[in-house]
Amino acid sequence: MNLSELNADKVIPAALKAVLINGFESSSYKDWQEFIEEWNGEDFQEDEYDIDSYSGAWEALYYVNAETWYDFAGDLKVRVAQPPMRGTSGDHDEYYVVFAITDGVDTRYFKRLGWYSSYDGGTLTEADDFEVFPQEVTTTEWFRK
């Protein structure tokens, strides 16, 4: 697989699965499937549902080292560039995760943008997938005297 041929709709579920298979580490759960089953309260059935349709799969990313590159496809590697987090965009809250895919020379970034509500928390199972790029920004914060 070539880095330039990747598209977000296919990359995000495959990246999620690759980092869980290769990087999930927990002393409380024997593997990522057991975590998903406990989180979702049902048996994990990979053949019946896509892995990204399980909310527990996204929560399992907290058990993956975001600094480590994992085998993805062919010579490509994947890592969690931004674990699931709540952010703000304009006047609403958002919930997202970003994966980085590299061929060792170039790196592309793919974002899954879900939603967040104070009542339900965040979800990434119903979301939009697209390519992004990193850019540093400067912000000003205000502190009490």
Image (tube, rainbow, N blue to C red):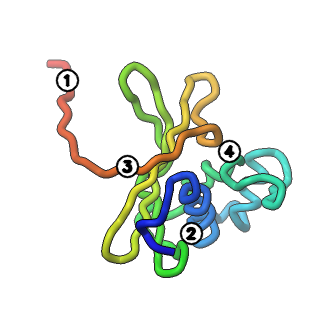
Q: Is residue 68 left or right of residue 63?
A: left
Q: Nearest to the eye among marks 1 and 2: give it.
A: 2
Secondary element type, mark 4: helix
User: Residue 132, labelled with which disc?
Assistant: 3
Specify which label sits upstream in the sequence, 4 or 1.
4
Q: Residue at x 60, y 62 (%)?
A: 14
Could you give the CA–CA distance between mark 1 and mark 2, rounded to whole angstroms? Answer: 39 Å
Decide which of tag 2 and tag 4 comes sooner along the chain.
2
Q: Quadrant of residue 43?
A: bottom right
Label whose residue precedes the other's in the sequence (3 or 2) = 2
Chain-order first, disc 3 or disc 1: 3
Q: Secondary structure at mark 1?
A: loop
Q: Which mark is residue 143?
A: 1
Element carrying mark 2? helix
Callout 2: few (<14), some (14-19), or many (20+) C-alpha neighbours within 10 Å? many
Q: Given this view, does label 4 or label 1 mark the residue nearer the observer?
A: 4
Relative to residue 41, is residue 21 drawn left or right?
left
Q: Is residue 55 above or below residue 110?
A: above
How far apart marks 2 and 4 lie (CA) works out to 18 Å
Comparing 115 with 23, the one in front is: 115
* Residue kind at label 4, given as amino acid type: Ser
Which numbered disc flags the more N-terminal residue, 1 or 2? Answer: 2
- At 58% across and 59% down in the image, what residue appears? 16
Q: Mark 1 Cα within 10 Å, few/some/many (few <14, many 20+)?
A: few
* Identity, as a three-letter code, of the amino acid under mark 1: Phe
